[in-house]
Image (cartoon, grey):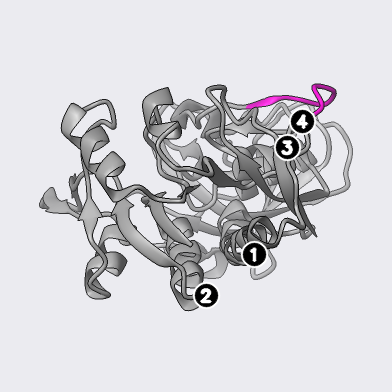
Amino acid sequence: MNLVFAGSSDFAVQSLDALLAAEHTVLTVLTQPDRPAGRKRRLTPTPVKEYALARSVPVMDPASLREEEVLAHLRQLAPEIMVVVDYGLIIPPDVLRVPRKGCINGHASLLPRWRGAAPIERAVLAGDRETGITVMQMDEGLDTGPVLLTRKTPIGEGESAGELRMRLAGICARALVDALDGLARGSVSPEPQPEAGACYAAKLDTEEARIDWGRSAGEIARQVRAFNPRPGAFTTLAGDRLKILEATALSGGEPEVHGQVVLAGPEGIDVTTGEGVLRILALQPPGGRSMSCSAFLNGHRILGQRLGDDKP
């Protein structure tokens, strides 16, 4: 098909690559504008823009799709369909109506569960055992359009949101190619989403990543996985922020003091919680690099200290 692709992140790159490999004609790529990044705050293109330009695919990076010249150019291109993956900007109704066969979206959840901005992280945080990709036809609602196909996958017991995201990117790429093939052959048809089970995956807030040691070890372990790699679950040690990158929940009693380090050795750092013990396996001190607990303990004595106490 002749199509327009809208995407921005590294997650979307795999889908664009798969569409090109399947010999669809990408008339243009829509992506977010270059933004400052890194310590020097240099203007940096999105991963999708870098990928597209390297393959001589035309790119448009408007700040908004409501600009009249953008709409006029898309109408001039006259695409059969638009494919949207992790684009990050609102697609207004006028743009949705441009492609003859409408717009389809690869969304990283099993809709209607986890509509919205952060479906992968929310699924991990909630302890979901299964997730997947939904390819849907877009309408004016927030991830409410009819479903063309779904691809399911289990969530690994210790799988972080970052690891799951990498797997889902590949599943999404294959699902989109299958959906376009199905549309061309007439073998897939849209089915309305049920409202039962619908929930919203709100955008991540950094304060959500702060660890409350009064919660159970299982909940905190999911929090660590859900916020890895971004923004990173964190606590404080002697007033300094400490990111927890990897942890596992252990059984245990209900101690009077939560957040206390009761073991610090080669196995990890064990911390009391509201229910059970959290064993920290990898962390990142302020201004430092990620490291194992063994490496951290070479320069820090923390046995008996209490995490989450902001007093230096």
Task: Report, in whole angstroms, how far the alpha carbon at label 2 lies from the one at label 1.
Answer: 10 Å
- Residue at (40%, 37%) from the top-left corner? 98
Pick the front one: 299 or 113? 113
Give the number of the disc on residue 181: 1
- Please, what secondary structure does the residue beneath circle 3 have? loop
Q: Residue at x 38, y 26 (%)?
A: 94
Alpha carbon distance from label 4 to label 2: 28 Å
Measure the alpha-carbon separation of dots 2 and 3: 26 Å
Tell me what residue is drawn at x 29 percent, y 50 percent. 77
Q: Are marks 1 and 3 in contact (CB under 8 Å)?
A: no
Badge 2 is on which residue? 22
Compare residues 269 and 175 and report the one nearer the observer: 175
Foreground label between 4 and 2: 2
156 relative to 43, above or below: below
Q: Which residue is mark 3?
A: 111
Q: Amino acid at mark 1?
A: Asp
Question: Which stretch appears magenta?
Answer: 194-200
Q: Nearer the viewer, mark 4 or mark 1?
A: 1
Is the residue under label 1 in contact with that under label 2 (CB below 8 Å)? yes
Give neighbour class at mark 3: few <14, some 14-19, many 20+ (Cα, 10 Å).
many
Q: Which mark is residue 193?
A: 4
